[in-house]
Amino acid sequence: MSAQLIDGRFLAQSIKDALAQQIAKLPQQPRLDIVLVGHDEASEIYVRNKIKAADQIGLKTVLHLFDETVSEEELLQAIEAMNNDKMVNGIIVQLPLPANLDMHRIINKIDPCKDVDGFHPYNTGMLQNNQNPYFIAATPLGIMQLIKTVCPNLSGKNVVIIGASLIVGRPLATLLLNQECTVTITHIHTKNIKELTRRADIVVAACGVANLVKADWIKDGAILIDVGINRLQGKICGDIDFADVQDIASAITPVPGGVGPMTIAILLQNTVTAYNLQNKSEK
Ligand code: GUN
């Protein structure tokens, strides 16, 4: 039997519709400021998609473009100005940054109350402690919602995550652990990944290697979440070989149309949350 498709586009649209309704009732448009450094092609596309989605729901965006020669001090000053600007509700720095810039120093400068990417150590630390961060990173939070459409009770599930990034693998592992899953994070130095993934109820692939996960990597009925967006012979494909696994998995996210749209919808949701947090006392 063919795996059920987990439709990220549909779920993302329902989140954006609800946000549009909320925003229409606010006295002011929530505002997201986006910092983009250099000319990474994928980053330019992601940022364009974020701005387009924000426009569609009535959320204001301001794009701060910097040349790759920008100094760390200049970026820190720009973020400081956004932190202090009452009109700015959310701030994101599109990653990756050019290698000469210290990503952590720059992210750590963002006011945690405006850190709608959830990357600031305050927010990652609170998540790690199973407390309430202001914000949780959009991709892992979106993935949790996608998994829950096909598996509402995660308690006791074996999950293998391929990739240990700040943006996906690490926060996702914490979210799953907080939901009583047994989580294994694998990475480039993991030996015999296949033996681990074969035992998993849920496999999340977030490593950026086109079609890495094949049929013999997964067990019958596994739920598969594909975070990869790779270009192979002119076509977009994920980290999971969709055609190879579709008759073995019970459910799978497509690429495109799975995790990607959810990331954007949750980022916008986080920005509306930021607006509400910052305007709470004035109500
Ligand atoms: N690069 C890839 N994904 C993301 C994301 O979710 N946020 C930011 N800021 N950069 C990214």
Image (cartoon, rainbow, N blue to C red):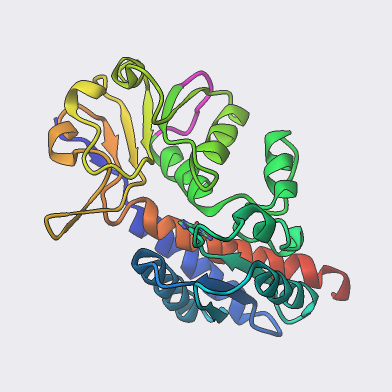
Nearer the observer, 155 or 192: 192
Q: Is residue 153 magenta?
A: yes
In the image, which residues are magenta? 151-157
Note whether 150 is above or below 248 in the view shown.
below
The x and y percentages for residue 98 are 49, 62
Nearer the observer, 254 or 4: 254
Q: Quadrant of the C terminus?
A: bottom right
Residue 118 visible in image: no
Nearer the observer, 279 or 267: 267
The x and y percentages for residue 4 are 24, 39
Residue 62 visible in image: yes
User: Does residue 262 appear to the left or right of 281 in the view shown?
Assistant: left
Query: Which residue shows up at 46% across the image and 62% down it?
Result: 264
Note whether 199 is above or below 282 in the view shown.
above
Query: Which residue shows up at 65% across the image and 72% down it?
Result: 75
User: Does residue 129 appear to the left or right of 14 in the view shown?
Assistant: right
Note whether 79 is above or below 253 in the view shown.
below
The x and y percentages for residue 144 are 49, 41
User: Does residue 126 appear to the left or right of 260 in the view shown?
Assistant: right
Note whether 7 is above or below 194 in the view shown.
below
Tell me the chief SS of the magenta region: loop
Nearer the observer, 69 or 135: 69
